[in-house]
Image (spheres, grey):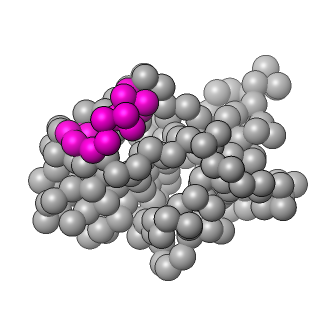
């Protein structure tokens, strides 16, 4: 069985109009929400073994916020292609870069991420599927399982949505998890 985690980047800052969209960091809310999702993943024993992350600043900072909560070895690949264009083909990129992972995570952007999650979710809790279809807020995480031998075999409606987590649904205080600069230097451009 394969498990896919689809996370939209946390809330980003628009405070510096001179920054290119690609270079926008997280705002204070985003800096709080990313670790909240990380803690929710930890408490639910969600452990990706490979992460594909957009190379945009806000996605790298989101990933940096969740990584301290993850256990086990995780391979990481930053992909410009997850950012480029109006609607990157997330499914093709997933199949191309998943390798031999069993628990793959993508940290990316909307609308492509939401469209992928909705397209793949053929079954699961109808209320969660509806919530995900209506809105995929910043830092939201969809978790889908596939009864498939490898990533190249997955297709639309083949996934079973087992969870859809939004930061506002997590009743924990993560103030102590926030650091002054949430992204380690190796994530900075």
Whether the magenta-drawn stretch holds residue 19 is answered as no
| Residue extending furthest toward the right | 180
The residue drawn where x is 63% and y is 49% is 170
Q: Position of residue 80 (x, y in %)?
A: 47, 43
Q: Quadrant of residue 11?
A: top right
Q: Quadrant of residue 176?
A: bottom right
Q: Position of residue 17 (x, y in %)?
A: 79, 20
Q: Quadrant of residue 87?
A: top left
Say which of 108 and 66 sits in front. 66
The residue drawn where x is 41% and y is 49% is 163
Say which of 71 and 164 sits in front. 164
Specify start and end residues of the magenta stretch as a single range: 120-133
The residue drawn where x is 63% and y is 61% is 39
Q: Position of residue 82 (x, y in %)?
A: 43, 40
The residue drawn where x is 41% and y is 32% is 132
Whether the magenta-drawn stretch holds residue 121 is answered as yes
When the figure is inspected, residue 20 is found, relative to residue 103, above or below; the finding is above
Q: Main secondary structure of the magenta part?
A: helix
Q: Position of residue 130 (x, y in %)?
A: 36, 28
When the figure is inspected, residue 176 is found, relative to residue 114, above or below; the finding is below
Quarter of the figure with the N terminus: bottom left
Residue 92 seen by the camera = no
Left or right of residue 186: residue 77: left
| Residue extending furthest toward the bottom | 72
């Amino acid at each position: 069985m394969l498990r896919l985690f689809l996370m939209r980047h946390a809330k980003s800052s628009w405070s510096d109009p001179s920054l290119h969209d690609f270079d926008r960091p997280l705002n204070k809310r985003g800096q709080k929400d990313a670790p909240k999702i990380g803690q929710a993943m930890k408490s639910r024993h969600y452990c990706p073994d490979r992460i594909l992350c957009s190379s945009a600043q806000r996605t790298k900072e989101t990933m940096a916020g969740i990584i301290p909560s993850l256990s086990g070895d995780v391979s990481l690949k930053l992909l410009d292609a997850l950012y480029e264009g109006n609607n990157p083909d997330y499914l093709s990129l997933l199949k191309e870069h998943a390798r031999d992972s069993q628990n793959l995570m993508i940290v990316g952007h909307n609308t492509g991420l939401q469209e992928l999650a909705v397209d793949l979710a053929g079954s699961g809790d109808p209320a969660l599927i509806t919530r995900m279809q209506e809105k995929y807020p910043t830092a939201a995480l969809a978790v889908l399982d596939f009864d498939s031998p490898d990533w190249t075999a997955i297709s639309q409606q083949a996934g079973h949505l087992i969870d859809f987590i939004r930061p506002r649904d997590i009743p924990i205080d993560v103030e102590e998890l926030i650091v002054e600069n949430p992204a380690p230097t190796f994530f900075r451009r």
